[in-house]
Amino acid sequence: MHFIGWGLVVGALAGATVALFRLFIAHMLAWIQGIYAHPSWPSLAVVLVLGIVVSIIAAVLLRQEPNISGSGIPQVEGQLQGTMEFHWWGILWRKFVAGVLAIGSGLFLGREGPSIQLGAAIGQGVAAGRHESGSERRVLIAAGAAGGLAAAFNAPIAGVMFVLEEVYHNFSPLVWMSSLASAVAADYVSMRVFGLTPVLHITYAHSLPMNQYWHLVVLGIILGLLGLLYNATLLSLPRWYGHLPIPRVAQGVVPLLLIIPLGFWMPQVLGGGNGVILNLGGQIPVLSALCLLFVVRFVFSMMAYGSGLPGGIFLPILTLGAVLGALYGVAMVRLGLLPQQYVVNLMIFAMAGYFAGISKAPFTAILLITEMVGNLGHLLPLAVVSLVAYVTTDIFGGQPIYAALLNRMTVPESLSQLHHPVTFEVPVFAGSTLDMHQVRDFTWPTGSLLVEIRRGERRLVPQGAAMIRAGDTLVVMTDGSRQARVRAVIGGAAARPLTE
């Protein structure tokens, strides 16, 4: 009951903050689309000045706090795993301001990642105010993250599931109930502001019949393969941007200026993608228009996220999935393999499948689309597409995108501190400090990196939630000059207790 109560407090604060975040973005985006809709030399001057000003402000904020870059979800994962640490207030206000400016400018960035980081920062702030530490602090951070996503999409159950499945990687009752309380409170606050209508309220007249379910398998395979392409492209973006003679914190000027001609050409496609999805639900374009829309959304979303500006990929992924579902459906109709009335169904299912293939979080994908669309009648087809896309990605060795992004952020930083890296092995004995201890719950010595857990013939990646057990062998990397001290600290924690 104690943490449920504080979960409600965190959720209410996160809900109010994210609702304000959504309002500012919506008003700024509507204003900028209005300017683009009436092209003239003055409007061109306005958007040019706006792009330069936003890029300067974002550069200053990113220089002050680099961890507001991107979606913020990898940073929250790293914080919960114990590999990253931030000052909550600095993250909160800078992410809010920079996120509103970047997303509100019309870039193809989502509000959900920043909302999760905003909620996590609020959870950390509440924990700091209560002088909480250790697992209690992490519970409140996780609860804040769940509340942030719930308020961003009015999807409380998906918010909880995403935190458990993708961010926290732990289904403990304490985390579950605290996150649920936070998500419910945040969703209530958000609904008081935005109303009861689901974020992506799309209606369709006919459920997909069982004899058409083979389309779900084919579509799931396509989405899984394209998810691999999405991840590979996204992870290569820092290398591509590295060729530009522009400091990293100022690279946001690239998408902010390149979006201007697109804005005058297609102002209706700007932003995270809510409007694009709803328009597709109302009227499906022809095949050539869908192909063009997919290419434009893919290229400009990659360009925006790769620049390091604050903004997420969650909603852009769902938008690309909707376009792919519509594209597949229209192609099947033209081939005479699908009745026209089921194209909207496939568009909805593809959003979940594409997200499941990229994030490898199928439960979140199913619940998220169910809550955002506001219809429980398509759980089975959503599950089929998500499962097939997940398996397809897994067969080809695809990583969850947020875990891969976190790995890019933390491992190079740890390794860069090692001038003469060496590895050594430490056996874990029964009853030792490390026995039945999660990786993130141990304070690893400065300059050390746990690179592997060997358990018999198995080789385990040491994620923060991984449990260390008696009989394990820990493979640790450190600098040669620190080896003796690091070995003494970790070896002591893994040794037999003196009472034996």
Image: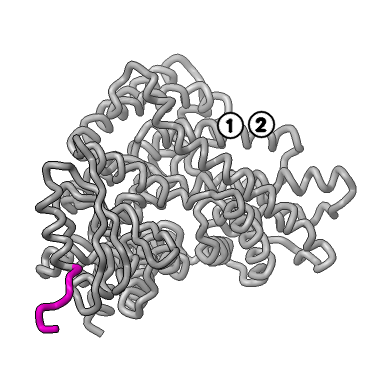
Residue 485 appears left or right of 304: left
- The majority secondary structure of the magenta stretch comes to loop
The answer to which image quadrant residue 188 occupies is bottom left
- Asked if residue 254 shows in the view, the reply is yes
- Asked if residue 125 shows in the view, the reply is no
- The residue where tag 1 is placed is 296
* Span highlighted in magenta in the image: 494-500
Amino acid type shown at disc 1 = Val
Residue at horizontal 20 percent and vertical 46 percent from the top:
478
Query: Marks 2 and 1: in contact by CB < 8 Å?
Result: yes
Q: Position of residue 377 (x, y in %)?
A: 67, 71
Element assignment for label 1: helix
Residue 307, disc: none
Residue 292, disc: 2
381, 223: nearer the viewer: 223
Q: Position of residue 276 (x, y in %)?
A: 58, 44
Instruction: Identify whether 270 is placed above or below 166.
Output: above
Quarter of the picture containing the N terminus is bottom left
407, 245: nearer the viewer: 407
Element assignment for label 2: helix
Residue at horizontal 59 percent and vertical 44 percent from the top:
320
**Badge count:** 2
Residue at horizontal 57 percent and vertical 30 percent from the top:
266
Quarter of the picture containing the C terminus is bottom left
Instruction: Identify whether 10 is placed above or below 119.
Output: below
